[in-house]
Image (cartoon, grey):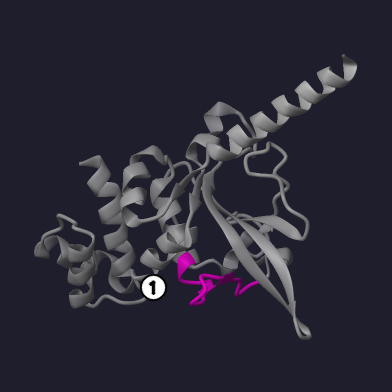
Amino acid sequence: MKMFGRMMSCCVALLLTFSSVSAVRKLNSITHLRSVGSDISAQEDCLRFLHWFANTVDINTNDDIRLTFGPNLRDYGSHQYRNDEQLLEPLPRGYQYYSLGNIHGEGSLQLPPQVIHSEQDDRNRARIIIRVREQNVGRRTSRIIDRVYITQHYEAAERRGSAYDPEHTYGITTSLLRAIRRFSMDRDDINLLMSLRNRYRSDADDSQLSEIRNEWGDLACLGLLVFIVIQHTSA
């Protein structure tokens, strides 16, 4: 009977683990991103951060996402994430989680101004978590990302410390990263803006595109992404 009881306890623990993992919804497209835009409290910060990340990593034809920086060196405000609250699935052998985006952390000055400077009152909540596998290629060590998540800390008023909010945690697929990469980092070409508007069926008219271009300058594509995701969901 004791053995049976231990087995039942293990089964319950496994079910709880799998249920917590399955609760992390995957976002596979701009349409999916639009569908949860109003659910993300720090939504513009998250979009700015995702846009920077998608345009910073390398994605090859096999959909491998390769790091272009060292999270173990605290680049871009990164640090090891231990997953103590079991927000994500347990790590397989040879993998590691890292959290990126602490704008007050060591290495955060490497982040571009559009990520660091925010008009939101409750700042520094958006984070990207990556799961990294190290792979030896000849004499080099290659770090490949096989999971990407966007998340945010609880609001300060909730007094949950540095824990992440599972209700505002989403898996980001390679397909979505590729879609975000279409919104180029440093281009304000009006023809490109029109093409992106039409591709993602935005209701922004030509005058609104001009306003976005004037307000955002070289980051006009990011401005259009913010418009598509946030203003669409708040309309």
Q: Find the residue positioned furthest to the top.
A: 1
| Magenta-drawn segment | 54-69
Classify residue 104 by image quadrant: bottom right
| Percent x, y of residue 82 | 73, 47
Q: In the image, what residue type sits under mark 1? A: Met
Q: Is residue 67 magenta?
A: yes
Q: Residues within 10 Å of mark 1 (few under 14, many from 20)?
A: some
Image-based side of 174 in relation to 94, left or right? left
SS assignment for the magenta stretch, majority: loop
Q: Residue at x 35, y 45 (%)?
A: 37
Classify residue 139 by image quadrant: bottom right
Q: Say whether residue 125 is visible.
A: no
| Percent x, y of residue 26 | 46, 48
| Percent x, y of residue 106 | 68, 61
Q: Find the residue positioned furthest to the right.
A: 2
Q: Residue at x 73, y 27 (%)?
A: 11
**Rendered-image quadrant of the N terminus:** top right
**Rendered-image quadrant of the C terminus:** top left
Q: Is residue 200 magenta?
A: no
Q: Which residue is mark 1?
A: 185
Judged from the image, the secondary structure of the residue bearing numbered disc 1 is loop
Is 44 situated above or below 67? Answer: above
Q: Residue at x 63, y 60 (%)?
A: 77
Image-based side of 58 in relation to 216, left or right? right
| Residue nearest the viewer, comparing 146 with 165 | 146
Q: Say whether residue 147 is visible.
A: yes
